[in-house]
Image (spheres, rainbow, N blue to C red):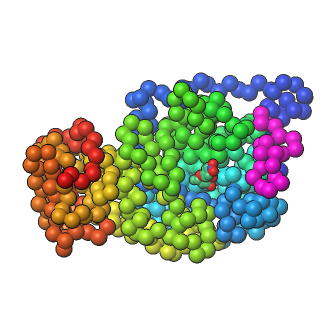
Amino acid sequence: MTMRPLIGSLLAVALQTPAFAQTPVPHVAPHDTPARDADRLAWWRDARFGMFIHWGPVSLRGTEIGWSRGKDVPTAEYDALYKQFSPEKFDADQWVSLAKSAGMKYIVITSKHHDGFCLWDSRQSDYNVMKSPLGRDVDRELSDACRRAGVRFCTYYSILDWRDPNYPLGEAPGGGPKSRPDMDLYVAGMKGQLEELLTRYGPIGLVWFDGQWEAPWSYERGIDLEKFVRSIQPDTIINDRLGPGKAGAPPLGDYATPEQTIGGFNRDRPWETCMTICQQWAWKPGDAMKSLRECLHALVRCVGGDGNLLFNVGPMPDGRIEDRQADRLREMGLWLEKYGESVYATRGGPYMPGANVASTTRGKVVYLHVLAWPEGGLRLPALGARIVSSAVLTGGEATVTQRDDVLLLEVPASDRDPIDTIVKLELDREGFGITPIASDPVK
Ligand code: JFZ
């Protein structure tokens, strides 16, 4: 079963005529004015923290989605898993409730990963969840649950498709080039699927493209895809994985996507680290899971760098998110309930993340996140602003002095939080206006 191209292309194939003239997609500049771009990203910048969900029939095997096809799991076996996919405990409201209790403001689900399986009722391809024993539209239920809860629904979509015969490449030993690929038909089918996702599931917060790196795809195709998405939902945010980069050409999409690593401090190009709470993107029994310290430090270092964190869970084959992952997320949510003012709707800096410190700012407030304490207290380069007052959000007292060009921060050991001591500084000016400062300790 391959993706059915748009009707026009089918007619063209049937009539052996040049591709049937599709309704021209209105030209929409991929990047509007900077103000328009900033407006589109505003909710996302303030949100700072999202849930990534990698799920599909592969959860039945506990191996990696897409990448284990034709490797850990023989291709034919992998592609037949959907016939056993019956996650009877799938409850979208439970997933959304967990995301909210974690303090996550948006959810991105793998509507279609590299293996081509669709988690929605796609008319373009029968290889979809409606043909599995579950027989329910996961994107429908999740998007509705998100809307009920005030969480943004977002979709991951893989440009490559190692299963679809029209996509030239496959990812499997011996699965190499397909016998009769047709990229034009493939792209027509892809646009048909994106049109389904962008017209039937309400406002889409963002489209998280992926699978843009293989030879059949190009920067130019990425530009075309960005225009296509914007022509349907101009307010949808799009990440940078629309296509490979191109020397001398502007980056694609609205933001960069460092993967499994904290992005560098950058206030100009928006960015979001995507990271797994365990090791694997899709569920794996017994997979090593990050400690609360690792999870919170990832979040604080992202926001301190003026970026977002898209944190991934992999639901089990029965549809549940395993308890230990859910518990870790709830621990993060409890921390955010107490200290979220130092994360949400802040910008990174003025101290750039370093070994011991990250910082965020909003208005005339700067939040110092002290993640480790050097001997003798913390000595940072001076802020170049007067400190009107200070308080330790995590409890206790701090002594903050600025002399010459050194800011000295002392908090008694008994008042230091083992994960993150947050010191709130009120300044005499906007923190965002202070030139970013390296936070390496000053002698
Ligand atoms: C991609 C996916 O392949 C991965 O499964 C997951 O969805 C992640 C969020 O995004 O990660 C990649 C992308 C490219 C390579 C490896 C992993 N690569 O080129 O080797």
Q: Which residue is drawn at 26% across and 60% down?
A: 370
Q: Can residue 7 be seen in this view?
A: no
Q: Which residue is drawn at 41% across and 29% down?
A: 34
Task: Find residue 281 and report its image quarter.
Answer: bottom right
Measured as percent of width and height from the top left, residue 363 is found at 22, 43
Measured as percent of width and height from the top left, residue 296 is found at 38, 63
Furthest-right residue in this view: 15
Q: Which residue is drawn at 82% across and 45% down?
A: 177
Measured as percent of width and height from the top left, residue 153 is found at 52, 51
User: Is 54 situated above or below 395?
Assistant: above
User: Magenta stretch: residue 176 in it?
Assistant: yes
Which residue occupies the foreground of this view, 413 or 51? 413
Q: Which residue is drawn at 29% across and 70% down?
A: 418
Measured as percent of width and height from the top left, residue 362 is found at 26, 46
| Residues shaded magenta | 167-185
Task: Find residue 199 and report its image quarter.
Answer: top right
User: Magenta stretch: residue 128 in it?
Assistant: no
Please tell me whether the stretch drawn in magenta is mainly helix, strand or loop.
loop
Is 70 on the left-hand or right-hand side of 91?
Answer: right
Q: Can residue 401 be seen in this view?
A: yes
Is 395 on the left-hand or right-hand side of 302?
Answer: left
Badge count: 0
Which residue occupies the foreground of this view, 312 or 14? 312
Is 373 on the left-hand or right-hand side of 208?
Answer: left
